[in-house]
Amino acid sequence: MMFTKGLPRSLIFLGALVVGVACAHGKAQPAASSKQTSSPIVLGYYPSWDTGISPPAIRYELFTHLAHAFVTATTEGLLRTEGNLPSEDLTRRAHNAGVKVLLSVGGADSGAYMGDICLDDARRANFIGQLLTMVERYGYDGIDLDWEFPRNSAERDALTTLARELREALGKRRLLTAAQSGTPEICRLVDMRALQDYLDFVSVMTYDIHGPWSGHAGHNAPMRTPSGDRARCTSHSLEAQMAHWRLSGSWGPERLLVGIPCYGRGFPVPRWYMDLPKKSKYAREYVAFRDVEKLLQEGWKKHWDEEAGVPWLASPTGQEIISYDDEASAKEKGAWAKKEGYGGIFFWEITQDVVGGRNRIVEAARAGFLGH
């Protein structure tokens, strides 16, 4: 799951401009082109809200692609933006470094409005037209769909329709990608096989496997499912979720990206796999990697879960625990992605792991994936 914050300002493209763009790109195009994605991909999500890291401070040399997150919308399909999105400054700097930039659409809770838009033909056409206007005006290289999440079979089909019409509108020279859950229960409301015809690649969100919603404490992004969690979460690990897209979705690994988080999740219990109190208080529910060192200085103790393949922290009182990724687990995930033949790795999000001017998680995973 990916997070937005702050109140967006409205950005609305109306009238003949929208209709003209939608019609101009309305001719059917061939299915997704693999020519643009044949090389190893290292993609980073860059948020539009203020994180203290502006486009000039991004280390473009670490990435092949960036996804600028997020443009959202009203239920009527009118685009809304916030912060530094859209940004010609970002696309220009990225292009000068040989990096492609995707316009990422949706984000957390986008399921509240995406269905209303995409089940209505007129709203969907207007929505697509506005997106294409923004892509062309600001120099984005394509669109990344992050619909979280379709709620029923009608919205399942609507996602496929949206992908098909966006593919036709974008043509072969622009990318169309999607961030998708790896959780089987959510994947049932996505036509995984049909999307192959329209998407260049899928970024599988192999994180947020546990959180306040899970009912018990568990790792945020375990490499493997630990024995203590198998009774409830047999398919909830990076390895299992990537396998689900390959086996159930019939996607070739070369068109799948492995997700690596630059943050962790905390739980107000002393041990893993304990049930969470009904009225839990989450003082540290979401912890950026850049804040881990401060916690260690405050007396938190670092541990390693060999079964899960990730580190975790215990509070000085022993009453809170945090699961996260560090350089070691990130490098292992990158190396595993390379060994298994996956097309790339990606990160949510690239301002959260900056320590001393360096993207620590990105650098480690990249080294594992590219064999450096």
Image (cartoon, helix red, strand yellow):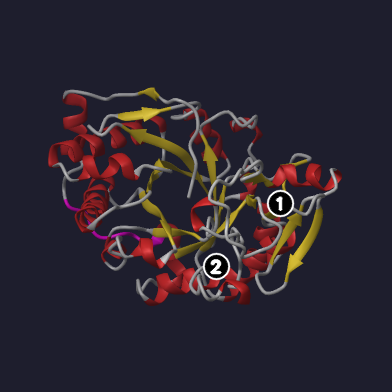
Residue at x-position 58% and y-position 56%:
276
Q: Where is residue 27 in the image (x, y as percent from the top left)?
A: 16, 48
3D distance between C-alphas at marks 1 and 2: 24 Å
Query: Which residue is at the front of the view, 168 or 204?
Result: 204
Q: Sequence-wise, which precedes: disc 1 or disc 2?
A: 2
Residue at (48% x, 69% y) in the render: 242
Q: What residue type is labelled 2?
A: Leu
The numbered mark at residue 320 is 1
Q: Left or right: 93 with respect to 31?
A: right
Task: Report the number of numbered marks.
Answer: 2
Q: Where is residue 48 in the image (x, y as percent from the top left)?
A: 51, 32
Residue 31 painted magenta = yes
Q: Which of 366 and 282 is in front in this view?
A: 282
- Which of labels 1 and 2 is toward the front? 1
Instruction: Evaluate whether residue 41 shows in this view.
Output: no
- Nearest the viewer among 138 and 348 is 348
The span picked out in magenta is 28-35
Q: What residue does disc 2 label?
A: 238
Residue 370 x, y percent position in the rendering: 64, 64
Q: Main secondary structure of the magenta part?
A: loop
Q: Which residue is drawn at 52% across and 28% down?
A: 89
Queried whether the magenta region covers residue 163, the answer comes back as no
Quarter of the image for residue 335 reads: bottom right
